[in-house]
Amino acid sequence: MTMRELLAFFEGFYGEKYSGIFLDTMTAYLADCSPSFYKATATVIVKRFSRTFGKAPGPAEIELNMNEILQAIPKPVLLPECEPELTESEREDARKMLKNFFDILENKSRGRTA
């Protein structure tokens, strides 16, 4: 959800249009928030701010419900870093190094030095 979509949702739900200083205040207050914040705000505010008086919510109503809004934002799932892909040449180099290492160990266990 975008800020404009949130404001349009509130306008439609509550019946009051944001305009003039009210619109300026809301856009300044909501600037730079994430889409998940806008969605959580819509979800919480419709449950906590009544339509009875036909007034759209402002920053005060959002602030009063900020803890619940923040808790309604889905937490990101952190994915582990991807392992870099090895080229076939790098794999072959690793095979050679391991073979040499095991040859050295085998020779030492037989009492020979390389």
Image: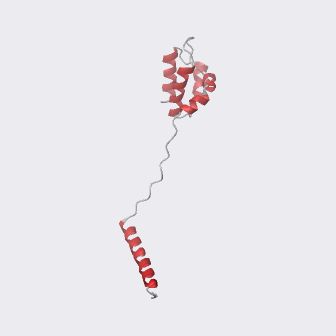
The residue drawn where x is 49% and y is 21% is: 9
Name the residue at the left extreme: 88
Render colour scheme: secondary structure
Image location of residue 11, percent across then percent down: 51, 18
The residue drawn where x is 63% and y is 23% is: 60
54 relative to 40, above or below: above
Task: Answer left or right for 22 relative to 9.
Answer: right
Does residue 31 appear anywhere in the picture?
A: no
Q: Nearer the viewer, residue 22 or 13?
A: 13
28 relative to 101, above or below: above
Q: Nearer the viewer, residue 89 or 80?
A: 80
Does residue 34 appear anywhere in the picture?
A: yes
90 relative to 3, above or below: below
Name the residue at the front extreme: 110
Q: How many marks?
A: 0
The image quadrant that residue 91 belongs to is bottom left
Task: Answer left or right for 55 relative to 113.
Answer: right
Task: Answer left or right for 34 relative to 99.
Answer: right
Image location of residue 38, percent across then percent down: 52, 29
State the quadrant of the C terminus: bottom left
Name the residue at the bottom extreme: 112
The image quadrant that residue 20 belongs to is top right
Image location of residue 37, percent across then percent down: 54, 32
Q: Nearer the viewer, residue 26 or 80?
A: 80
Image location of residue 104, percent across then percent down: 44, 81
The residue drawn where x is 58% and y is 29% is: 68
7 relative to 112, above or below: above
